[in-house]
Amino acid sequence: MSNIGTYGKNILFNWAGFAAGVVVTLYVSRLVLLGLGEDRASVWALIVGLVGTMGLVDFGLRPAFFRQVNALIGRGERDRINEFASTVLTLFVGALVPLVAASAICGAFFGDIFPDVAPEFRAEAVSTLIVVALVLGVSMLATILDSILDCHERFDLRNVMTTVYHVARGVGAAWALHGGASMTLLALSQLGAAILWLTGSWIMVKGVVPDFKFSPRLMRKAALKELLAQGIPLFFHGASLRIIFYVDSFLIAWLVDYRMVVHYSYATQLVNQGGTLISLAGRVFVPRI
C-alpha cells in the first residue's frame, strides 16, 4: 500500500476510534448517573478521580516508551524492542501491588477524605477502589502494547482494539447496572473490558511483530535509565494535567456538595472531548514533522 493509502487508512481509523470513545464515554456516564443515582454516582466519580491520580505511578514511562520504540525503529534496532518492552511491562506488573495497596488505604480512610459522603457508601468504596486500581494497572499494560502498534503504523489495529474495549465497557456497564446499583459490579465490568483490551492488543502485537516477547529476564538497567531520562520530564507534565483534571472534583466535594461532582464531571467530559477533537484535528491537518 502506498504511503498516501497508509496515511489515509490511519487517519480514518483514528477518527473512527475517537468517535467510538466519545459515544461510549457519554453513554456510560449517563448510564452511571441513571443507574447509580446522584449520590452513588458522585461517589463513583470521586473514586475514579482518586485512582486516576495514581496513574502517576508510571513516572512518564508510557510516553517515553513510545518515543524510544520510534527511535529504535528509526535506527534499525528493532531487536531491542523486547528489551525495552520487558523493562516497562515488568515494572508495571510490579506496580499493581502498590496501586492496590494505595487504593485499599484510600478506601479505609474514604470517610475521612470525603466526610460528607453518606456512611452507607463508604464500605462499598473500599472494594470499588481496589477493582478500579486494577483497571488502571491493566490499562497501563495495554497502552504499552498499543504504543508498539502505533510505532509500526498499525493505527488501524490499535483503534479496532480500543473500539472493542469501549464497546465492552458500554455493554459491561449496562449489564452491571441492570436491575441494581452496585459500584463494585460496575468496576468489575470495566476490569473485564480492560482485560479484553490487553489480551486483544497482545494478540495484535504478536501478529505485527512475530518475534515480540515479554520476559522479566529481558529487563535491563540500561533500558530503564534511557526511559527515565525521557520519562521524568514527561512525568511532571502528566502530573500537572492530572492535578488540573481531578482536583476540581475534590474541591467541589469538600467545599460545595459531593452530590454535585457527578454533574460537574459529566460537563467536564464534554469539554475535554471537545479539546481532544481540536487536538486530533490539529495533528491531522497540521502534522508535526
Image: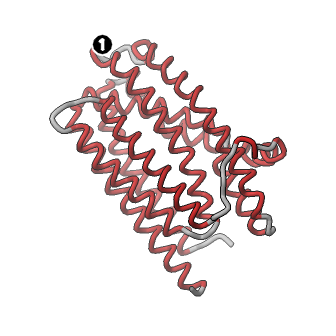
Residue at x 69% of width, y 45% of height: 215
Name the element at disc 1: helix
Q: Nearer the viewer, residue 15 or 100?
A: 100
Q: Residue 30 sits in which quadrant?
A: top left
Coloration of the structure image: secondary structure
Q: Residue furthest right?
A: 222
Task: Identify the residue shown where x is 82% and y is 41%.
Answer: 221
Camera-nearest residue between 284 and 102: 102
Q: Position of residue 220 (x, y in %)?
A: 80, 44
Local packing at callout 1 (Cα closer than 10 Å; few below 14, some 14-19, many 20+) is few
Vertical comparison of 258 with 245: above or below: above
Q: Where's residue 155, x and y in %?
A: 53, 67
Residue pointed to by mark 1: 119
Going 47% across and 56% down the picture, which residue do you hit? 200
Q: Nearer the viewer, residue 273 or 122?
A: 122
With respect to residue 232, does 167 lie above or below? below
From the viewer's perspective, tell me whether residue 198 is left or right of residue 179.
right
- Numbered marks: total: 1
Asked if residue 198 lies left or right of residue 229, the reply is: left
Residue 62 appears at what percent x and percent y? 64, 48
Where residue 238 appears, x then y in whole percent? 61, 43
Amino acid type of disc 1? Pro
User: In percent of the image, x 84 and y 45: which residue is there?
Assistant: 222
Please identify the quadrant where the N terminus is shown.
bottom right
- Residue 57 sits in quarter: top right
Relative to the observer, which residue lies in front, 29 or 71? 71
* Picture quarter with the C terminus: bottom right
Q: Residue furthest left?
A: 179
Q: Residue furthest bottom?
A: 2
